[in-house]
Each structure stands twice: as structure tokens, then as C-alpha cells.
Image (cartoon, rainbow, N blue to C red):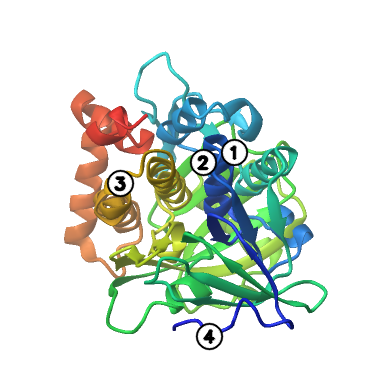
């Protein structure tokens, strides 16, 4: 999609220039923008939604240990990380029996944060704007042009309806699975690897006391979970058919199922403010770059929410991209830009495997209607090993913390 001749000189178009245009103001885009500002690299962030929508949208999120240390290395941890530090454990309940499993690496350094995604977004946004960042909401009709040239062009219509164009050196596509960034890559360039887990979750947001730590429960009735979404708010998950209807889950049925599956007859109920059916799926697009466009976060990959890796992969991508642009702008070194996709995908596939393992283990170990008794026995054996083996617990903690040899030296 090459830019038209005279596109930036058309008097009907308000034209400008920057180093990086960031498409999307979620965790990926705002992290990219903040890190670029720390490097002294100028950028413009375009977001199609309103500011109120972006700051209030409820999404899952635990900032893993690796990501906390990444923000700390950039000097941003105190400014952008809300929530509370993890106490280093997850709680599993199997048929009501309680097990604590470590989710920390055992060091004295910063640990994971139980930080709702909207809190992270709010703090990233405030930090970026406080530092003089350029963030434009309600950017409509965004289109990307000349991505394989030296100066890509991003066109959009601003909140007042004025047509604008920005020339840049790079585009960071941080606008999610259905955004314009990946759609701007020509057919046949990217390979898509998709997997449908055949599992649905009823997700419930309620004004109830949160648990002291993330809680994952397995029983013959199916999987359930309870997570904090703030000091007075909880997010619950209930396994259900992927094509189920949220309307089939009135409040009494929700609370009865949660008390049964969580093994907590005294679980307090409260006002339910949101419920929907979520289908578990995984998706990887590769490569994660095309010309001067680099895909970041959900624009390149979707991970089953089990293990909390989706947002953290986006933060990892953002870190690698910002460092690569810094090296190019500061030193003329494009090696990190050229290897961006390969380095990101190494971690993407590692986290996909962990998420898939945990998804299958916790769902197969419960209701065996679909998986069968043999797979249920295998899943129960994996859980027993996790609860009784120090080596298995250590490997699980390392994966939850997000640490690996490359990540440990990337700072």
C-alpha cells in the first residue's frame, strides 16, 4: 500500500513527522511510548477509542517478575506499577484441598505485582503525558502506507474530523488482534498458527472481597478461579461450553457454581457488574515485522489466559522494540531491529507452551466429560508432581516469573 504522490503536500491534509508512530494505547502501546521517551526518541500514539474507554476497560493482568524488573531497569517501576506485590504463591484447590505453589524466583529482587490491567494502563498513560508525550484519542480511519520504504506514512482522521498524515521512521503496531496494523501486511507475508482449546469460560466481575492470592480450583464440576481486580472487586471464572449463553447464568446459579467449585460454601456474594462468555484460543503470527512495521503484543499473538502471559508478552515485545529503535537512532545499529521477530517469537512459543500445559492440566483434571478418564488421570498426576516435587515447583515458579537465560541478561 504505497503512499500516493503528493500525499504529504496536499493542502487538505495536515502533515507532520516523528520517529515512531505507535498504533494503540493499551499496555503494549503505552509501554513502547514510555520507553521511547526514556530513550529520547520522539513518538506519537494514536488510539481510536476515547480516553474514558481506555482508562476504564476491565482486563486481566498480573505483571510477572520479569516485567517488574524490566520497568525497574527503565526507572519506571515506582511510577507505573500499581496493585500489590505478590506474596510469591498461587493457591490451587483440588476437590477442595488447598495447595500453595510458588510463583516467584526466590530472589530478593522485585517480584510479580497483582496489578489489574486498567491500573497499569492508567499509570502508563499518566507517566507518558506527564513527560510531555503526544497521545491522540479518537483517531479514526487509520491507514498505513509505504511500510517497506524509508519513511512510512500513517494517515488518520482526528477527533475534529480533520485528515492528518504523519511521516515516520517506524510504526509500532500495538492495536490488538483485530487492528489495522496486522491487516496492513499484504496477504501471504505472515504465517498464522491458530489453536482453539474447545473450552469456554464464563467471566464474572463482581463487587466482592478479593482473595489474598490468585486462586485456581479443580473439581469434577469443572474449573473455576478467583482473582483480585482491586481492593473491593473480584474477577471469577467458571468453565463452561464455549458456545454457552451468559443469560443462562443468572446470579444464583453463578454463586452456587462458584461455592461448589471453589470448595468454599461461605463465599460471599455481591453485585455482579459484568458477565460474558470467553472462548479460550491461542494464535501466533510470524514474522512479527514487515518493512518498517513491527507488531507488538496481541497484534502478533494471542495466548490462552491461563498463566497470565498475554499482557506480559506484550510488555516483553515493547521492551525489545524500544531498545532496538534506541540502538538504531543512537548508534546506527540495526541488528536488534533485524532480529526483533526471532527474539520475540522465542519467548512467545515458550509462553504458549506453558499456557497450553497449564490449560490442559487444570481442565482435564476436573470434569472429564470431554477429555476422558485417561487424560484426567494424567492431569491429576501432573498436579500431584507439582505439589510434591521441589524440582517441579521450581520449574513452575521460573515459568510463572517469566525468567529465562536471555531475559535474565536483557536488562
Callout in the foreground (4, 3): 4
Q: CA distance from mark 2 to mark 4?
A: 47 Å
Question: How dense is the environment of label 1, judged by Cα within 10 Å: few (below 14), some, or many (20 and up)?
Answer: many
Q: Quadrant of the N terminus?
A: bottom left
Q: Secondary structure at mark 4?
A: loop
Query: What residue is disc 4 on?
Result: 5
Residue 74 coordinates in the image, percent (x, y): 50, 30
Horizontal side of 254 relative to 89 (left or right) equals right
Residue 244 coordinates in the image, percent (x, y): 52, 77
Query: What residue is disc 2 on?
Result: 62
Q: Secondary structure at mark 1?
A: loop
Q: CA distance from mark 1 to mark 4?
A: 47 Å
Query: What residue is disc 1 on?
Result: 115
Quadrant assignment, res 189: bottom left
Query: What residue is disc 3 on?
Result: 336
Dot label at residue 4: none
- Name above or below for residue 291 compared with residue 169: below
Quadrant assignment, res 154: bottom right
Q: Secondary structure at mark 2?
A: loop
Whether tag 1 and tag 4 are in contact, CB under 8 A, the answer is: no
Q: Secondary structure at mark 3?
A: helix
Whether tag 2 and tag 1 are in contact, CB under 8 A, the answer is: yes
- Tell me the residue at 45%/73% (across/down): 241
Q: Nearer the viewer, residue 279 or 370?
A: 279
Q: Is residue 225 visible?
A: yes
- Tell me the residue at 72%/36% (across/down): 231
Question: How dense is the environment of label 2, judged by Cα within 10 Å: few (below 14), some, or many (20 and up)?
Answer: many
Q: CA distance from mark 1 to mark 3?
A: 30 Å
Q: CA distance from mark 2 to mark 3?
A: 28 Å
Amino acid at each position: 500500500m504505497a503512499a500516493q504522490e503528493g500525499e504529504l503536500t496536499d493542502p487538505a491534509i495536515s502533515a507532520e513527522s516523528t520517529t515512531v508512530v505507535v498504533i494503540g494505547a493499551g499496555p503494549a502501546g503505552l509501554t513502547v511510548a514510555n520507553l521511547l521517551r526514556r530513550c529520547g526518541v520522539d513518538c506519537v500514539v494514536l488510539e481510536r477509542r476515547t480516553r474514558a474507554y481506555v482508562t476504564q476497560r476491565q482486563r486481566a493482568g498480573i505483571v510477572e517478575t520479569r516485567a517488574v524488573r524490566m520497568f525497574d531497569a527503565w526507572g519506571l517501576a515506582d511510577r507505573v506499577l500499581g496493585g500489590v506485590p505478590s506474596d510469591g504463591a498461587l493457591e490451587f484447590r483440588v476437590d477442595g484441598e488447598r495447595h500453595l505453589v510458588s510463583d516467584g524466583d526466590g530472589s530478593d529482587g522485585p517480584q510479580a505485582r497483582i496489578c489489574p490491567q486498567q491500573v497499569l494502563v492508567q499509570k502508563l498513560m499518566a507517566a507518558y503525558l506527564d513527560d510531555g508525550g503526544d497521545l491522540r484519542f479518537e483517531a479514526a480511519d487509520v491507514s498505513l502506507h509505504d511500510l517497506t520504504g524509508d519513511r512510512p506514512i500513517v494517515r488518520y482522521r482526528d477527533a475534529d474530523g480533520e485528515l492528518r498524515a504523519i511521516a515516520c521512521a517506524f510504526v509500532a503496531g500495538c492495536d490488538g488482534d483485530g487492528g489495522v496494523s496486522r491487516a496492513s501486511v499484504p496477504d501471504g507475508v505472515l504465517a498464522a498458527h491458530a489453536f482453539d482449546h474447545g473450552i469456554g469460560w464464563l467471566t464474572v466481575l463482581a463487587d466482592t472481597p478479593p482473595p489474598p492470592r490468585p486462586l485456581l480450583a479443580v473439581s469434577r464440576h469443572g474449573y473455576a478461579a478467583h482473582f483480585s481486580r482491586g481492593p473491593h472487586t473480584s474477577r471469577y471464572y467458571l468453565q463452561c461450553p464455549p458456545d454457552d449463553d451468559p443469560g443462562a447464568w443468572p446470579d444464583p446459579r453463578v454463586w452456587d457454581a462458584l461455592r461448589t467449585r471453589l470448595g468454599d460454601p461461605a463465599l460471599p456474594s455481591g453485585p455482579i457488574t459484568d458477565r460474558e462468555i470467553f472462548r479460550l484460543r491461542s494464535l501466533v503470527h510470524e514474522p512479527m515485522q514487515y518493512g518498517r512495521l513491527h507488531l507488538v503484543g496481541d497484534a502478533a499473538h494471542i495466548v490462552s489466559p491461563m498463566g497470565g502471559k498475554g499482557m506480559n508478552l506484550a510488555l516483553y515485545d515493547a521492551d525489545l522494540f524500544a531498545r532496538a529503535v534506541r540502538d538504531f537512532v543512537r548508534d546506527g545499529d540495526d541488528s536488534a531491529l533485524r532480529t526483533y521477530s526471532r527474539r520475540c517469537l522465542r519467548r512467545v512459543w515458550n509462553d504458549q507452551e506453558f499456557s497450553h500445559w497449564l490449560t490442559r492440566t487444570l481442565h482435564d483434571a476436573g470434569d472429564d466429560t470431554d477429555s476422558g478418564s485417561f487424560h484426567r488421570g494424567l492431569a491429576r498426576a501432573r498436579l500431584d508432581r507439582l505439589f510434591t516435587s521441589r524440582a517441579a515447583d521450581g520449574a513452575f515458579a521460573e515459568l510463572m516469573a517469566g525468567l529465562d537465560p536471555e531475559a535474565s541478561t536483557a536488562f
